[in-house]
Amino acid sequence: MKKYINTLCFMCSVRCPIQVEVENEQVISIRGNPHVPAMNGGVCPKGVAAMAALNDTQRVQSPLIRTGERGSGQWKRVSWEEALDYTADRCKAIFDKYGAKSAVYCERANLISDISKSFQKAIGSPNHFTHDTVCKGSINTACRSMIGYTDGQINADWTNAKHVVLYGRNVFESVEIKAMNSFMAALEKGTKLTYIDPRVTITAAKAHDYKMIRPGGDLAFNYALMNIIIKEKLYDAPYVKRWVEGFNELSRFVDPYTPEWAEKETGLPAAEIVSLAREVSRVKPAVVFHYGYRGSHHPTEVYFRRSILILNALIGSIESKGGLFIKKGLKDAGYKAGLKTFSSQKFPEMEDKRRFDGCGQDKFPIADPAHGVGFMFPHAVINEDPYPIKVLFAFRYDPLLSNPDYNTNMKALQKLDLIVASDVNFGATTAMADVILPESFFLERSDPLQMGSGLKPAINRRIACVRPRFDTEPMWWIVKQLADRLGVGQYFPYETAEDIWKYQLADLDIKIEDFDETGSVSLSDKAIWWDRNDGINFKTPSGKIEVVSDLMESHGIPSLPAYEPLDRQPDAFRLMCGRCVAHTNVMTQNNLYLNHLVPENRLWINDRRAKELGIADNDRIEVASNAGKGEMRAFVTDLIHPEAAFMLHGFGHKEVDSKRSYGKGVADAMLQERHHDKIGGSPALDHTWITVKKL
Amino acid sequence: MGDYIITTNPKRCIACHACEIACKSENNIPLEATLGKIVVLGPKMVNGKPKMSSVFVPCFHCEKAWCLEACPTEAIRRREKDGLVYIIESLCVGCKACIMACPWHIPQWNAETGKAIKCDLCMDRIDQGLEPACVSVCPTDALSFGRPEELSDKTRETYAHGLLERNLSATSVR
Ligand code: SF4
Ligand code: SF4
């Protein structure tokens, strides 16, 4: 009998609503959930490739305990009982000596993060971090400093925007299907797209105006835009008067940053900056200056992200149709309570609350402890600062390939007493583990409900479509089993996924059956907007958009520090990294189809500079930085700025069990040096200079 | 294309290749064989601006089907009801005559079975009232599937509507 099951994809973190066709425990097809119109009934290549991922025999097929050297790929297959007992016994011995705080738990923020955080609280460790800080720690901090919400709590109104400005936000390759389709429909109706990136992407090819900016020039570009917007009074004056704190300071601050000044920093003609300022002003407030993901990651990133938000504020776009909006949740939809969380239970008082990363404490006073600063992990381990770290739970996350400076991270991993990994596939960190507790694939497992905040909030459900192919379990089960063995099982009052759903829905008048038909429960039929004249609930101390930020100033951090030019190294290249449509972070390079589509990364270098170095397209080259080096092939092209070099993130896998991706390409993490934004906590992923030579 | 046609809207296509992967994985064909192929040009610089274009190339199900005529074992047949050209696997002896005969070398080689395979526009899906896998999976709706006459109708109407609307709004402004 054929079944059609509505669930949530997890080939990437977007978690698109999908419909899975199943017959006799086999997945026949995967499509967009037809109840969600913006999916267009489609899925991206990663979604389609989930079928191959499900049946892949290169998955972790059972619990494993390491028998050879770390990373040797020598494992003993064991039962769940044995793997869990082994893990718990090792933990107990270590905790007796160093305390539970010696255990760090890292993951990609996901549907079980609430349970993961509860686990750390239950065992008595303050140390949990997510991958978020790597890509968006500084965006998060910038957002909180200005509007009191995180970047995860806002979004762009793609459908109604009249002009969208993207800084390396490659929407047509790093796809989020619903947003992409809404935007595509808007483009067909005449919405303008300005795309700014040192590299030509698919998004650049779809833009009305593509600007090949000098790498790192975005901040100067934005200051010049502000300069013109203020000088020519192109801003939304009533909105600015009502909502913006610090406008006078801003006016004084941007006065010297003229378009002519910016031309030198960005390589873009002053006249183009002026005309963009005028163009966006004409359609205000239906303008999106997109705040996120990619663009320049430098040590000053928090100020770059703030500059984007300031532009939105000047143009009046925050909480305006066609601009940015603040996501609405259960309470905004008229419900009295939210989804009940496990992490809000009362846990025993921790004896030592100092975090390994000093996030929200001494080292990063205004970064977000909900995500932590993973960048500090190797520092904490190697220097035992603030105390010895002995155990790493790497659950569904590969810090080794995801964080800059592979070699230093590797040194930290080698120093640990115990690495417990849990994942569907072998990743670089999983391969280094002492014990692997394999997780079931998303098509094989049900997970906690997802709160889908937005203009029309909804609750969404991932539900198992087929039985596990191998001896694997869902993460919430694994965590509970460990908790039981460490004597804190009482904080995980569930046996099944249904128990978890019931717990989450306890305070709401919503039943589990309500999800059966469409996979979600919609909480509002119409878009919830706040009144932009008087009803926006900014969560800053002033209740306004704080260009001069209380959060920053109260910690002695300046809101508007003078611009510092980036250094120049004429003989080197500024390394940039990014995504393509085929791969998710470091997770999919070994997938049968996706590996076939994009099997390795090549280094993009400008044709003129390649010629000077005697490098032809596809030549083997050596790429080196102060952090490390590697060998790969060159992609010689006029599609990249001469000062920049680019490589796709996620390659350079060396785990022997991933046979398709093994040894292909170079990991950007191998070359990225340890630079970071000391305020927002993000690593400065685009700050490293590399040299290139022909082999 | 028998009675059908698949068209590509290059403005919508993002060169993601979901169409190709769905074709491979749902029809269970080997990795190296590509029945429906998305051909992408670019991005490349044209007069200082990045441009790209693409077109999806399935089997055309020709009216004069070279492959069918070349096949010595009559393994390649044409469906009476809609003109789709398909291969009966059990009759294929693996001589590759169809691959050579097709001006575009569209039939593919299945190295695992030693037989030729080709796009049949997912006839089993068509019979269930569905679109071919490639078309239905496309996340941006860049591919459309239909009968040539519908297509011509639709395109002409959209185009003419645009013109008419422009005329109307032009008069209203004056
Ligand atoms: S395989 Fe070639 S000759 Fe045969 S129907 Fe298709 S396009 Fe025509
Ligand atoms: S699935 Fe659609 S968007 Fe993707 S390559 Fe094929 S036609 Fe283009």
Image (cartoon, coloured by chain):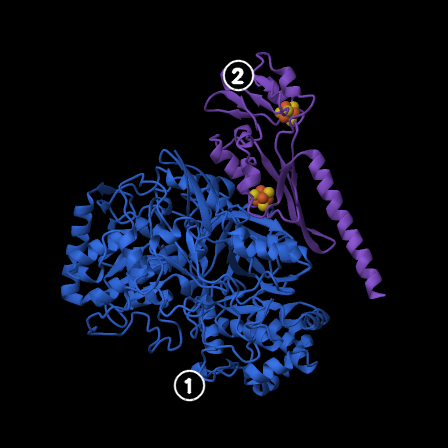
Position of the N terminus of chain A, as image quadrant, is top left
**In the rendered picture of this protein, how many numbered marks are placed on residues?**
2
Left or right: where does residue A311 sit relative to residue A470? right
> Against B88, is A412 above or below?
below
Per the rendering, the mark at residue B92 is: 2
Residue at image location 52% in from the left, 32% down from the top? B128
Q: Identify residue type, mark 1.
A: Ser
Between A333 and A363, the one nearer to me in the picture: A333
Between A156 and A418, the one nearer to me in the picture: A156
Q: Is residue A609 visible?
A: no
Q: Residue furthest front?
A: A509
Say which element carries label 1: loop
x, y percent for residue A295: 54, 64
For the residues marked 1 and 2, what is the alpha-carbon distance in whole angstroms?
78 Å
Residue at image location 57% in from the left, 23% down from the top? B86
x, y percent for residue A505: 32, 61
Give the image quarter of residue A486: bottom left
x, y percent for residue A238: 62, 82
Chain depicted in purple: B
Q: Identify residue type, mark 2.
A: Cys
Q: Can residue A598 be seen in this view?
A: yes
Per the rendering, the mark at residue A554 is: 1
Between A175 and A530, the one nearer to me in the picture: A530
